[in-house]
Amino acid sequence: MADRAVGLSPVAGAPDPEGGDCVDCGRCCHHGPHTVHLLEPDELRMGPTRLAEFTELQAAPPHFRFIVNQGHVCGALDTSEKGKYPCKIYAHRPEDCRIVEPGSPACLEARALGHLGSSLGFKRSDSA
């Protein structure tokens, strides 16, 4: 996954724990293909139009659905404005994206590497 990812330059410092600087960071959205998968509730939340535009279904069993990826960046990431990384489907994003909390080990690793790493710590240690 992250070994293939080409990311951004690392970001120093701690993130806003409420996610206020996530759009200025975007490092967790830089990752290899087949990283963000969807489950049925994600598909329902996204609806048919977004599914057609932003996802791909594996041709071979087990036919998992993933967010499209251009090889190193999430296909739902808007990279049109330099230095800004908003999500085109933020309100409808899959659970895989929702679980990465600002300040979690995965977030901090992505900030340090410039792309999503291999950490499976998606929740902050101060979370209940």
Image (cartoon, rainbow, N blue to C red):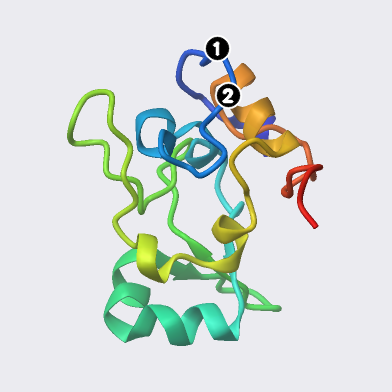
Q: Is residue 105 left or right of residue 92?
A: right
The answer to which of 41 and 58 lies nearer the viewer is 41
In the rendered view, tell whether residue 46 sits above or below residue 28: below
Kind of residue at disc 1: Ala
Residue extending farthest left: 81
**Local crowd at mark 2 within 10 Å, few (<14), some, or many (≥20)?**
many
Q: Closest to the observer: 62 or 3? A: 3
In this view, 40 is above or below 120: below
Above or below: residue 65 compared with residue 5: below
Q: Position of residue 78 (x, y in %)?
A: 27, 44
Q: Secondary structure at mark 1?
A: loop
Q: Position of residue 14 (x, y in %)?
A: 59, 22
Q: Quadrant of the N terminus?
A: top right
Which one is in front, 17 or 92?
Answer: 17
> Which residue is denoted by mark 2 in the rendering?
111
In percent of the image, x 18 and y 36: which residue is there? 80
Which mark, by number, is residue 12?
1
Q: In the drawing, what numbered circle is on residue 118?
A: none
Apparent side of residue 99 relative to residue 105 in the rendered image (left or right) = left
In the rendered structure, are the residues bearing label 2 and label 1 in contact, judged by CB atoms less than 8 Å apart? Answer: yes
Indicate the quadrant where residue 89 lies.
Answer: bottom left
Q: At 43% from the left edge and 29% from the top edge, which residue is drawn?
A: 25
